[in-house]
Every structure is written in C-alpha cells, then in structure tokens.
Image (cartoon, rainbow, N blue to C red):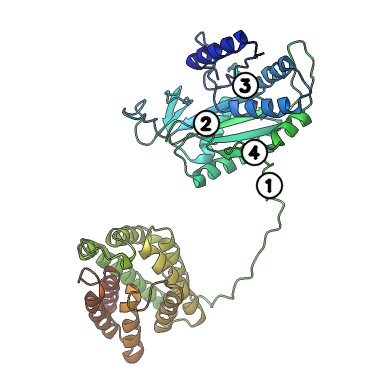
Amino acid sequence: MNYTGDRLNFGLAAERARAEGVPVEMVVVGEDSALTGRDRSAGRRGLAGTIFIEKLAGACAEEGRRPLAEVAALLRAVVHQVATISVSLSACVKPGGGPSFDLPSGSMEIGVGIHGEAGVGRVPAVTADRAVAMMLDHLSNPESPVSLRLSGKVALLVNSLGGLSDVELRVVTAAAVTELRRRGAEVVRCRAGRLITSLAMSGVSLTVLNVCDPELEDGTAPVTAEQLLEWLDASASAPGWRYSAAPRDFHHLPRVVFPRAPQSTEVDSGSAQDDCVARRLSRCVEFAARALLACSGQMERLESGGGDSSDSSALYGGQMAALCRSVLDALPDLPLSRPSDLLSSLSELCERSAGLPGEEYSLALAAAAAAISETPDDWVGALRRGTEALRSWSPAPPGQRWTLEALEPALDAAERTGTAEAAAEAAQLAAEQTAARTASGRPAPAAHAVGVWVRAVAEALKLH
C-alpha cells in the first residue's frame, strides 16, 4: 500500500529476503481517487483496492503457471484499473488519544484515509444515495490521475471503515449497485464487509475494478477479463473473504398486487354531519396526545429506580412523549373525516416511533382500523378488536401485560355501559392496582398511559 511507512517497512523486508536468496517482487497499490491533479508528495494512497489486488495475486500465483516476475507485472497493470473513494461521518479515535481530526456534527468528510487521516473536502451529511453519487463522481473525475470509466463490466468492493452496522453497509451497497447501473456499468461481482478498517470510524469506501483485459507496459494483454473473474471467484481460506457473487437484480420479478377490500361509501366531507364527526375525532386525538405528553414525566418517575424489566423499557415515558409529538405534528394532515383511514394513519405513525409504545399502539390501531371499516361507527367493536390483537401477540405472561391490564377493564366497562366515562374510571382504577405487581411498587407506566388517554377521550366527548 502506498504509504511512506508501509513502503519503507516492506522494502526493508524485501531487501532482507533477497539477501537470503528469496526471490521478491513488490507491487505498490495507490488507487486513492480523492485528490485531483498530480500531487508531488509520496503519490496516491493505497486503500481498500489492495484487497482486489491481493486476491488476484493469490489466485494467480496458486495456479503455478506463471513466474513471479510475470505475476507482479500483471498485477501492476491491474492496479491502473482500480480506484477507491471513501467518506466518513466521524473521525478515527486512536487508543489513548482523541479524534484524528475535528468533524462537526451533521458533516461528512470526503476522501479519508485508512490511518485516520482527514479527507480532501467536507460537505453536509446527505442520504446514502446522494453520498454514493458524489463518491462515484470523484471516481470518474477525468482530472484525477486515478480515474475510471464507469461503464462496461466492473467489480465493486464496499468496505466499512469499522463503525458501520451491517444494515448501513448493505444500504450503501444497494445504493452503489443501483447508481453504477444507472451510469451504464454492469456490476458482475460485488463484495461488502469490514476488510480494511480504521478502528471504529463511521465511514465507508467504494472500490471499483474495471473488469477488462489488463495491458502490460509493452502493450500486451496476457490475460483476459474472464480470467480476472475466475481469480476473484477462486476459493480462499481467509476468514474475511467470502464469495463475491454478482448482485441479484430484482427488477425483473413480477409485482404482486393484492386486491383491496371494498371501502365503505364515503360521506361528502363538506356535509355538516361529516364535519361534526371530523371535529370530534380531531378533539379526541388531540386531547389524548396532549394528556399523554403532559404525563410523560410522571410516567418516567413511576418507572425510575424500580428496576422492573417486565415493563420492557425504562424509557417508556420518553418514548410515549416522542410518539405524541409526532401525532400532534401530523394532526392537521390526518384524514379525520374517514375513521378507518384515520386509525390506519395513526398506526403508521406509531410504527415509525421507537420503543414499546409505538409497537403496541401500532398493532392495536391497525386491528381497530380493520374493524371500523367493516362496521362503521362501532367504536366499542374497534376497541375490542385492538385489545384482542394485543392479547394475541403480546409475549408477556398474564398479569404483566401492563397495557392490557388497563385496556381490558376499560373495554369491559364500555361494553357493559356504553359510556366513555365508565371506561375511563375502570382504566384508571386498573392502572392503580398494577402497583401491587410491579417491582417498584408503583403503577406500571404502560397501564397508567391507558388510564390517561381513555380519560382524555372521555373529556373530549363531553364537549359539543
């Protein structure tokens, strides 16, 4: 790899080996495409493209058909067909020291090195798709000494610099394959993983190898592009290398369309009756969200210090607060005149919210939406369907399913009396009684939340 320290140390090793009669050839990889223009320092840095060269070197040498000098000459030719660009959202933090460079939050560094060096530019953080497009622009910049044509057959290497999760790495990989195809390249091989890292730097590098016949300095092409692919595909015992297959194209798969259930006839949204229903639903949603938001601190106090793992999360109050803020932000755009669509929209909002509250209420609201679409205006039936869904899917044992501990008594009261007031009283009483079964001796926050929102809905329904 073309770093001064690497070249000096490998050069020392080569000289010592030659002194002992061991034939040695050195191939220097410097495929960094971050800088434009011909730099006058030590040359281009070696980055993750070294992995491609090492894989080809091992497979070629293992065949045993070419002398060492020919193998080295071939690899030097292939180096000119490789380019790498990297980007990072954080600096490298070395043991016993601080960050290798300062990077403000919300920024990303273009062209970082694998030893924690800063890059050649800094831009605001963008989505994976836009970051990949920016990186490939660098790779194909004609002003760079390391510039590739992003057309024809290519092999792609997506390398985590250490701190990316597998999910993030695969998001970048999918974006890179899609963008390369958009630019006219045929991605015949793709490999993603943590191959050359900078400790835990939250970054990624893209390496592209033009899979074409490599030309030696004398203009000859001793091997074909097909041979390069065979060497890339050759088995290897290195634990970090797995088979690099061509990425599958899912675009040809037929799209499956499921018929939607017939929707109930909608009332004109401008009618007085419809406007009245919409106002009442809006008031119920707003009252419930504001009441839960106001009580989120109380929920946190209920759960603090108790160590009650059966309540799933010591962050319930904070998660509920975040969920309620998202509901209030979305309230003006919710389909308030269509109850089934309203419940479905609320379910989707909950699904996007982190934590147990979002998971539970997303499930319950989805089931309630299906019920209200079948029997409009049967809100008790919708409550029943949502409660049954939670009961069916909750993994907690009876007596510790805290949301259900308050929701089921509320449902019983609503079915028995037909009033929201009775449901609220039953939910609040049941929530208080959970204190006898929690490790903290306090009411369970999830049960308390049910009492809060059922009471808020009851108060909203009293207004005309």
Q: Which of marks 1 and 3 is in front?
A: 1
At label 2, the amino acid type is Ile
Q: Which of 404 and 462 is in front in this view?
A: 404
Task: Looking at the image, tell me whether mark 1 or mark 2 is earlier in sequence order.
Answer: 2
Q: Nearer the viewer, mark 2 or mark 3?
A: 2
- Asked if marks 4 and 1 touch (Cβ < 8 Å), the reply is no
Residue marked by disc 3: 147
Where residue 196 is drawn, which disc sits there?
2
Which class describes the residues within 10 Å of circle 4: few (<14), some (14-19), or many (20+)? many
Quarter of the picture holding the N terminus: top right
Label 2 – label 3 distance at C-alpha: 22 Å
Task: Looking at the image, tell me whether mark 3 or mark 4 is earlier in sequence order.
Answer: 3
Label 3 – label 4 distance at C-alpha: 20 Å
Residue at the spot 51% in from the left edge and 45% down from the top edge: 166
Which class describes the residues within 10 Å of circle 1: few (<14), some (14-19), or many (20+)? few
At label 3, the amino acid type is Ser
Residue 92 falls in which quadrant of the image?
top left
Residue 401 falls in which quadrant of the image?
bottom left
Q: Which of 417 and 96 is in front in this view?
A: 96
Task: Looking at the image, tell me whether mark 2 or mark 3 is earlier in sequence order.
Answer: 3
Regarding mark 1 in the picture, which secondary structure is present there?
A: loop
Task: Looking at the image, tell me whether mark 1 or mark 3 is earlier in sequence order.
Answer: 3
At label 1, the amino acid type is Arg
Task: Looking at the image, tell me whether mark 4 or mark 1 is earlier in sequence order.
Answer: 4
Residue 190 x, y percent position in the rendering: 64, 38
Residue 408 x, y percent position in the rendering: 35, 81
Label 4 – label 2 distance at C-alpha: 16 Å
Residue at the spot 60% in from the left edge and 8% down from the top edge: 19
Residue marked by disc 1: 248
